[in-house]
Amino acid sequence: MNEKEQIFKDVYDGLIPKRVPVSVSLEFEAAAQFGKLDMADMQWNPGLIRSSVEKVCQTLYSDVCPVNTSIRLPGMYQFLGSQSYVLSSDGFVQHPEVVGMMEEDYAYLIENPLDCIIERVIPRQFKELAGENPILTAIALSLGMKKSERDMNVSFEIMGDMIKKYGYFSHPPNSSTMTEAPFDYLSDQLRSFSGISKDVRRHRNDIKESCEALYEFAYRKGLPSKSSKYGRVFLPLHMPPFMRTKDFEELWWPTFKNLIHHYAAQGIHCTIFCESDWTRYLDYLQELPTNTVIWFEYGDPKTIKDKLGDKFILTGLYPLTALKNKTKSECLDLAKEYIDILAPGGKYIFGFDKLPVVISDVNMENLSALTEFVRDYAVYDNPGELAGERFNKNDYSIAPYRKTESKYFPTFNKYKELHPNMSEHGRDEYDLISDGIFQFFANMVY
C-alpha cells in the first residue's frame, strides 16, 4: 500500500516515482460478468457484486482498485421514469438520443439555467416528475433519491473494503468529483447531439450565452467538498472531435478553459478524458494548468509526449482491443513500445484508451500478464528527481463569471428572511443538505 500510494503522490507532486503507476480497472458490469452474476439482478442489488470484485482483485494486478464504482445503476432512473438512461434487456444501462430542452427554452436557460433545468429539462427527461399530482411527484423523487443513496453506499463500501484489503491507492475522501464542460452539459442531455449540431448554425449566439450561463452550474457540480492535491475533478470531453475547429475555438473552448483554471487557482487538479482523436487540439491543451491529467483515447504517443509530456500527466492510449486480438507476447511488446515513449521524464500513468465495459472486451489472461509486466518493466533509475514543469496555483486566476440565484436553492440568508426563527446554528446543516440536493439534480443531467 505504501508503495502504491507513494508512486501516485510522486507523480502528482511532479517527481519521478519509483515506477510507473498502473491504473487499470474494469467497469462494474464487466466485473459482474467475470463473476458470472445475473446482470439485471446485480443492477438492482449491487451488493451482490462483492464476490465478483474480490475475484477481480485476486486475479488482476493494479495500483488502483481494479473495478470502477458504477454511476449508472438503473434503480434511481427507473423510479424517476428516466428516458435518458434506461435498462436494456441484456442488463446494461443505455443512453438513447433524447432531447430535454427545446429551442424556445434558450432564453430561459440563459436567464436562469438552474431553474430552467429543474422546471423544463428534468420533467421531460424524467417522466415520473412531470405528473400533475404533487404527492406522486414527491414520492417518485424520494424513491429515486433513496435508491441512489443506497446503491452508492453499498458500492462505495465494497470498493472501500477492497482498497483497505489489497492496499490500492485512492484519492483522499471527498476530494474527487465529476463534472462536464459547459458546452457538453448543453449538448448531452439538454439539446442532444443532433440538436446541438443544428444549433451551432442556427443559434450560435444562444449557445455562447448558454455556456456562460451554465458555467457556474458546471463549476459547482465539480467542486470537491475537501480540496487535496491528490484529489481530482474528472471531466469526460465529448463534443470537440465532432466539431469544426472554428466552432470549438469560439463556442466550446473558452468556458472549459476558464473552468479548469478556476479550479487550479484553488489548488484543485483535474483529469480530463479526451474522447476520440484530439490531435488537432493539442496546441489548445497546452494552455491548461500544469499537472492536469490528460487521458487520451487515440493519437500518436510520440507527438503527444513531445508536445505535452513536460507539463501534463499523460495516461491512456494503450488499445484495449489488443488484449482480445493479440497474443500475450504481442500485448507485452506493445506495452513496452508505449512505455518507452511515454514514461521517460516521469508524468505518466499506464492506462487503456477506454475501460472494459463487458468482460468479452478483454482476454483476462493477457490482461493479468500485461499489468504485471508494466509493474516490473516500467521502473525508473532516478526516483525523486523533478519531473517537468512544476504546478503553482498562483499562476492561475479566476475569470469573472455570471452568477445566478435560483428560487429553488436560496442561500441561507435568503432562506432565513423567509423563516426568521431559523437558528443561525443551522447554517452549516442547511448549506450541506441544500448542496446535496443540488448535486442530486445536477447528476440527473450529467
Image (spheres, helix red, strand yellow):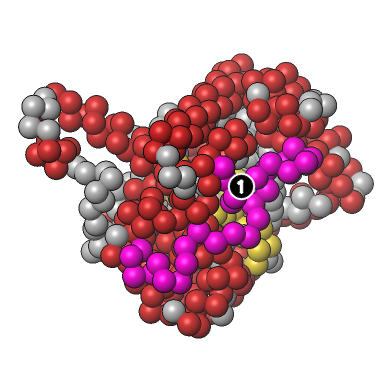
31 is higher (above) or lower (below) than 220? above
Q: Quadrant of residue 361?
A: top right
Q: Position of residue 108 (x, y in %)?
A: 33, 65
Identify the residue at the far right of this view: 327
The one nearer the camera, 137 or 259, is 137
The residue pinned by badge 1 equals: 85
383 is higher (above) or lower (below) than 124? above
Left or right: residue 337 versus residue 75 is: right
Pointer 1 local density, CA inside 10 Å: few below 14, some 14–19, many at least 20: many
What is the magenta range?
81-109
User: Which secondary structure dominates the residues rendered in magenta?
Assistant: loop
At horizontal 56% and vertical 74% (from top left) the residue drawn is 197
21 is higher (above) or lower (below) than 53? below
At horizontal 17% and vertical 26% (from top left) the residue drawn is 426
At horizontal 65% and vertical 55% (from top left) the residue drawn is 96
The one nearer the camera, 273 or 279, is 273
Left or right: residue 428 versus residue 219 is: left
Q: Position of residue 403 (x, y in %)?
A: 24, 58
Query: Which residue type carries mark 1?
Result: Tyr
Q: Quadrant of residue 68?
A: top right
Residue 44: in magenta span: no
